[in-house]
């Protein structure tokens, strides 16, 4: 499916969510959190700033979630240009489910919720191997919400599935608040060096202390840029999760300061268009 509306000049957000609490299928969303409320398009539009297009990413491991996101994207008047949905990659019928998703042109990929799967090596298991091959065969991408514990596995993942386009979400969520850098930096550098994977410059603010400054994030942003280059690094807001770290505008403006001006167009727009085929 092609959008009738052209993509206007401006920023592309590669990672945002919507959710509706009444669906009761967000197991990670603690009722004590300030973001335990509905977030839909009407809440996103007032905080867009210079964002002209987004990639809408699943926040629940359910088929209903993906169907809802597709429906929302279709009536977003060109704002949502891609959906990253969910499918049970270990199910016997995964190939058919993936084919069905691929038939929706707005669906660009899928995301398993690795951070909530106890088995670190699950993504390399035999039960999901055929489904990952099916993603590549049907032209879909894989968003990997890796944690630092997953990084040593990613070169093998890329080797097993050389035609599968993969992006690492949130820079693999280094523990910035605890100043954990060396091990994460070494492992993500290896991934960048040994694989063609892309990486999202997203989710960093929520891993830092509540009173974070540019200087807290700078070593991590600089390292990701050095490792992946602007052509494999793409910005994402992680809205509305980013509300917990000062909000959309605070993170967006920090990213624009931390990323060299010469790389703004690639990281804040072009890499996303290339990777997701927007």
Image: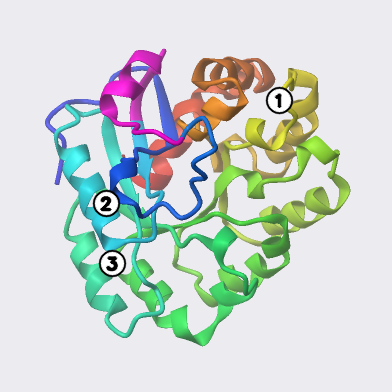
Q: Helix, strand, or loop for circle 3?
A: loop
Mark drawn on residue 210: 1
Q: CA separation, marks 1 and 3? A: 41 Å
Residue 6, percent from left and from top: 20, 25
- Around disc 2, counting alpha carbons within 10 Å, would you say few (fewer than 14), some (14 to 19), or many (20 or more)? many
On screen, 218 above or below 200?
above
Mark drawn on residue 56: none
Mark drawn on residue 138: 3
On screen, 65 above or below 16?
below
CB contact under 8 Å: marks 2 and 1:
no
Magenta stretch holds residue 148: no
**Which callout, 1 or 3, points to the residue nearer the camera?**
1
Give residue 258's quadrant in the image. Answer: top right
Q: CA separation, marks 2 and 3? A: 11 Å
Disc on the earlier residue, 2 or 3? 2
Kindly identify the residue that appears in the image at 31 percent across and 76 percent down: 94
**Which callout, 2 or 1, points to the residue nearer the camera?**
1
| Residue interval drawn in magenta | 36-53
Residue 233, percent from left and from top: 57, 39
Kindly identify the residue that appears in the image at 69 percent across and 58 percent down: 191
Disc on the earlier residue, 1 or 3? 3
- Around disc 3, counting alpha carbons within 10 Å, would you say few (fewer than 14), some (14 to 19), or many (20 or more)? some
Mark drawn on residue 107: 2
- Around disc 1, counting alpha carbons within 10 Å, would you say few (fewer than 14), some (14 to 19), or many (20 or more)? few
**Which callout, 2 or 3, points to the residue nearer the camera?**
2
Residue 245, percent from left and from top: 61, 26
């Amino acid at each position: 499916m092609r959008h009738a509306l052209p993509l206007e000049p401006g920023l592309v957000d590669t990672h945002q969510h919507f959710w509706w609490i009444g669906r009761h299928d967000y197991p990670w969303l603690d009722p004590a959190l300030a973001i335990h409320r509905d977030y839909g398009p009407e809440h996103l539009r007032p905080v867009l700033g210079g964002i002209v297009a987004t990639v809408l990413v699943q926040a629940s491991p359910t088929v209903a979630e993906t169907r809802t996101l597709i429906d929302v994207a279709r009536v977003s008047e060109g704002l949502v240009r891609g959906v990253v949905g969910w499918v049970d990659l270990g199910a016997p019928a995964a190939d058919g489910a993936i084919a069905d998703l691929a038939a929706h042109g707005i669906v660009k990929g899928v995301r398993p919720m690795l951070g909530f799967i106890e088995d670190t090596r699950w993504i390399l298991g035999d039960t999901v191997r055929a489904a990952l091959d099916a993603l590549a065969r049907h032209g879909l991408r894989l968003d990997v919400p890796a944690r630092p514990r997953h990084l040593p596995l990613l070169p093998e993942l890329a080797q097993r599935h050389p035609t599968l386009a993969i992006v690492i979400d949130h820079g693999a969520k280094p523990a910035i608040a605890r100043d954990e850098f060396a091990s994460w930096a070494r492992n993500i550098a290896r991934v960048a060096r040994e694989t063609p994977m892309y990486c999202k410059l997203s989710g960093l603010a929520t891993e830092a202390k509540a009173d974070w400054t540019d200087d807290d994030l700078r070593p991590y942003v600089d390292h990701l840029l050095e490792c992946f280059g602007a052509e494999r690094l793409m910005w994402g807001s992680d809205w509305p999760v980013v509300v917990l770290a000062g909000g959309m505008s605070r993170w967006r403006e920090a990213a624009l300061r931390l990323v060299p001006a010469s790389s703004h167009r690639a990281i804040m727009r072009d890499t996303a268009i290339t990777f997701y085929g927007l």
